[in-house]
Image (spheres, grey):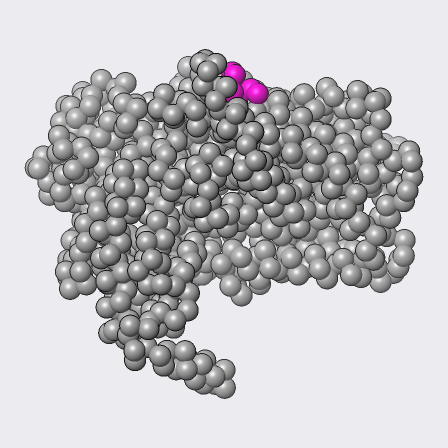
Amino acid sequence: MDFAVIGTAAAEALTLASFIGIGGGVLLGYIVGVIPGLSRSVAISIAIPMTFYMSPYIAISFLIGLSKGTAAGSAVSAILLNAPGEASSAATALDGYPMAKQGKPKTALQVGLIASVMGDILATIILIFVAIPFARVALLFGPYEMAAILAFALVFIAGLSGGSIFKGLAAGGLGIILGTVGLDNQTGLPRLTFGYTELMDGMPLIAVAIGTLALSEMFIQSEKLRYERGTMSVAMKKDPNDRITWPIFKSILPTILRGTGVGTFVGALPGLGPSVGSFMSYGMTVKASKDPDSFGKGNPKGIAAAESADNAVIPAALIPLFGLGIPGNVSAALLIGAFAIHGITVGPLLLRDSPELLYSIFAGMILASVIMLALGWFGLQFFAQITRVPPHVVIPIVIFFCLAGMMLQGYGTFGLIILMGFALLGYLMKKFDYSFVTFLVAFIITPMLELNLRQSIILSRGNWAILLDRPIALFFIACTAVALIALIYRTFQTDKAAAGAPVSE
Amino acid sequence: MKTTFAAILGATMLTAPIAYADDWPTRPLTMVIGFAPGGSTDIQGRVLANVMEQYLGQPVNVVNQPGGGSAVAFTRLMNVEPDGYTFLFGGTTALTFTPIITPVEYEIDDFEYLASVALGQNAIVTSAEQPFTTFDEIIEYGRENQMTYAQQTPLDEAIIGAIAEQEGLDLAIVPTGGGGGMAPLVLGREVDFAYSGGTHAQYTPTGEMVVAAFMSAERSPFYPEVPTLMELGYDFAIEDYRSIIVPQGVPEDVKDRLISAAEFASESETFINITEGNTFFPVVFIGQEEMETSVRRIRAATEEVMAE
């Protein structure tokens, strides 16, 4: 590493213009993140034209700051409103919302922010110093490995939801069926589109995520408002004890480190994305805990696990991008376009041809994390004012943003109908205790799993022995089997416990 | 009916100033792109929009309408007001190929092909670490070994399938779900060779990926030593033009303004630098008359390939 280059790069990163550019990006991202219905990829694609007038370094740092901001901001609506704006913050709401309802909204927000920033900075450091030279490792994960990891993620995350295995299978099965809608990857023939051109690329993810997560929650809350007026909103009291303390920080630190590790791993593998990262991290934290029953009821570790992994995915998705030129996820793919518009081809050549630019971007990324911490910390008070607004004002506004976010996707009225359909589905699932997490994760994973499984079967020509040369795939297949057996065993145990005294026949 | 009438009335009022062609456009335009942001069509489209803006004197807003390889965007375009304020930028395969296998609502004659500004680049690529680099070497290797190929469309699969049969190759063909999915498979040597619709521009400068042959009708000026399939003796070509397309019924003088804006852009240094320098698509301006015959000729040829 050339330290003179790094010095110049750092100097450029610390100019006033870059402060304004990156700070603006983080702020904009944070606001988009806070508003349920507006998503990260929408924010980036809207912001790309703005970057035409910026220098390449500021443009890219602005966009990366924007993605980081959305990841941290989406925790706010998840915690305070139980209305996650993105699938990747759904795991944050599991413990964040109960904690906020217990009168600790500020602690919950602070835990989320610190986990986000730490996950972010640590993953950025890994990106800079360790990962790029080793980016080729990602190529060891071919179709066999990816299919095995996705199968494991599906079973593992589905296992989190608890409850009846049959309800879990129903929810997961529905997610899988809806995940297969669209044009077949190979033949290009439409599947389950019922003649709608709009469904050719599958059920729009935004409609599914906003519908089942945020909009359905607003239906639930309106219903509560009808019957339990006044008892439901989270009021931000001036409670001096409602803040993050050293013991809390110490207790969540290992969780954050684990979350960063999981997030970095998931982010570095092209295609997996932040939702898989945050749920995997959440699940591993629950499994590692001595008191797994405390999760879902306001355990700060749950928030820390989800948020650290969600944020770590963003810098980690740049590992294959800078190391190999392969985007790690949708947001990273958008960045390729942004680079190209500025006349830069992203990939391994960037380090050779314009190291100044690359190191400036790294410095800008660290700066973005620091700005995010400051902004989030002082902004906390402001953003948390949402909770003082009475629910009969908040609910319609959130519904409006959900509908507006869908309209931005360009599906027109058709999109709104689909969104409403999924909101109703989410409402019924929540009412009848079907896991919407299992449903959503199955929906997100299915298309990737199908493609990789199909590739594996065709490439192996149906020969199982090929797996013997694939230790990583074998490892994850074994993990999947163990997770599956554990799941069945647990259901069996709960059934027995639920039945109380054994029924003699 | 009342709303339809109101819409027509509104449209007439808005389109009225068109009579003075020099005044057109009087409000911002919309460029529809049938792919998600980040791909080669999107990059070229955004730069093109920027340059056309300078010529037309009104902002050109880019709207991404991904889905079904532009099929969704064309369905939408068919239904917009034909006033020239909304036009599409993209390749022509959604018209020359997609309707053959997918039930779509639109047809070639629903649109007008005003101008093309760049030639599509369809290539057969392989990893530099493979024991073969040219198409002939691939075929030779395939006569003695089982081989794998990563497709992106049923069209390239049909062509490679036909060649494999002709040459007696034992070939397994896998889907990739696009250029982003193709690159890891080729670089990780999970597949022996693959189709690339332009993604190779990102990987050939590092020497990791090599272009074995072009499926386009002509050689690429950026890889002058790489032959086309036609030159190698296979009677197949995938032709694609990055064009400006409007629905039928746009007034003549508005079309002329858009065509001159496209011609202006094809001569602009910014557009040429990004399109040729970053996406490796040769910038070539082709006017409406030639485009209209080209799309229909390609469609007929594609139907022939797919029928086999």
A191 left or right, relative to A490: left
Res. A187 visible in picture: no
- At x 57%, y 20%, the residue is A125
Whether residue A301 is visible here, answered yes or no, is: yes
Q: Is residue B94 left or right of residue A161?
A: left
Q: Give the percent coordinates (x, y) of residue B22.
A: 29, 72
Decide which of A93, A32 is in the foreground and name it. Answer: A32
Which percent across, then down, holds residue A305? 70, 29
Q: Quadrant of residue A257?
A: top right
Q: How many marks?
A: 0
Give me the residue at 84% from left, 62% from top: A226
* Quarter of the image that includes the C terminus of chain A: top right
Q: Main secondary structure of the magenta part?
A: helix
User: Is residue A383 highlighted in magenta?
Assistant: no
Quadrant of the rendering where the N terminus of chain A is positioned: top left
For image coordinates 23% across by 68% down, the residue present is B256
* A184 shown above or below A427: above
Q: Which one is in front, A401 or A21?
A: A21
Per the rendered image, the range of residues in magenta is A125-130
